[in-house]
Image (cartoon, grey):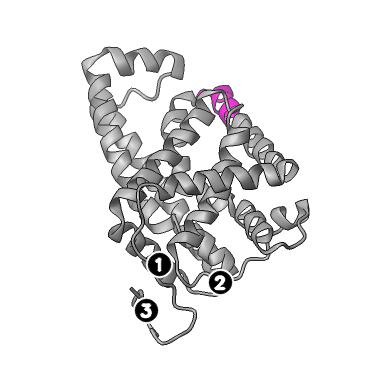
């Protein structure tokens, strides 16, 4: 099931590994859990660092009276999250190969395709900006041009008024569609570009093909990621200390299981 690229004869051409099952996402999570506790210092440092930065960002939004955008921004994080987990992919790769591992290795990763990864990262950031713009337009559609209210005032309006419920339903549907489209593009392409010398288009095509040919398992995988990360955020980012490295390590195993020639 080779992905068609500009030069299909190249040995670096990524290929889907075959049919996945609904048990596979749980296996990836289990493997990610083992990796996390095989190197708890590095994994939890990564989690603390990411949770701390996220918390500071949220507090900053409250200080500048932009707390209402915390909700769409939290949802938008799912679009670019794979980029921030590159160090965790590298940690799992080194653990898998029995290589030495230090904190420097995960903070300063030497990726196999740095320019291609940067290109994909720019596209994912554009997707995040597009989502934030769409969220603003949806708010204006349901509430007019009054401006975003503070989050504590907005939450009751969101769940207790017809306009709020309408925004919640439509926003969730639109956000889920965008999130899954971006997930299909980036779920496997980001770890692939970290690991292998391939171009971004080939990596994206391979990722999309795996999702297309295994919709059930990959939908389940996307749901698991969303739930785990949501729990991490809902606990005022305390849970993110564990959630982020767990998902990062598990994503490496998802990539390894889904791309047959990922050696």
Residue range corresponding to the magenta coloring: 57-65
Residue pictured at 63% horizontal, 66% vertical: 111
Residue 140, numbered label: none
Circle 3: element type: loop
x then y, percent, for residue 226: 43, 38
Q: Nearer the viewer, residue 193 or 77?
A: 193
Q: In which quarter of the image is residue 98?
A: bottom right
* Residue holding disc 1: 17
* Residue holding disc 2: 263
x then y, percent, for residue 200: 46, 69
Q: Disc 1 or disc 3, which is closer to the eye?
A: 1
Outermost bottom residue: 9
Inspect this view and state whether residue 62 appears: yes
Residue pictured at 63% horizontal, 48% vertical: 35
* Residue holding disc 3: 5
Left/right of residue 120 with respect to residue 112 in the rendered view: left
């Amino acid at each position: 099931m080779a992905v068609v690229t500009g030069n299909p004869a190249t040995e670096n051409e990524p290929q889907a590994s075959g049919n996945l099952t609904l048990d596979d996402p749980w296996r990836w999570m289990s493997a990610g859990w083992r990796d996390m506790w095989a190197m708890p210092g590095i994994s939890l440092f990564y989690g603390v660092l990411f949770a701390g930065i996220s918390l500071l960002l949220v507090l900053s939004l409250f200080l500048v009276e932009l707390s209402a955008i915390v909700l769409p921004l939290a949802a938008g994080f799912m679009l670019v999250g794979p980029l921030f987990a590159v160090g965790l992919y590298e940690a799992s790769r080194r653990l898998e190969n029995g290589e030495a591992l230090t904190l420097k290795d995960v903070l300063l990763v030497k990726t196999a395709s740095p320019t291609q990864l940067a290109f994909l990262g720019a596209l994912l950031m554009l997707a995040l900006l597009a989502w934030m713009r769409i969220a603003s337009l949806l708010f204006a559609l349901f509430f007019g041009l009054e401006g975003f209210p503070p989050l504590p005032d907005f939450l009751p309006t969101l769940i207790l008024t017809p306009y709020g419920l309408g925004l919640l339903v439509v926003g969730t549907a639109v956000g889920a569609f965008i999130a899954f489209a971006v997930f299909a593009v980036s779920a496997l392409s980001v770890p692939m570009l970290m690991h292998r010398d391939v171009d971004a288009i080939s990596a994206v095509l391979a990722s999309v093909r795996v999702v297309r040919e295994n919709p059930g398992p990959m939908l389940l995988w996307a749901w698991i990621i969303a739930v785990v990360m949501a729990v991490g955020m809902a606990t005022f980012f305390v849970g993110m200390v564990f959630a982020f490295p767990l998902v990062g390590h598990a994503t490496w195993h998802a990539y390894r299981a889904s791309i047959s020639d990922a050696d």
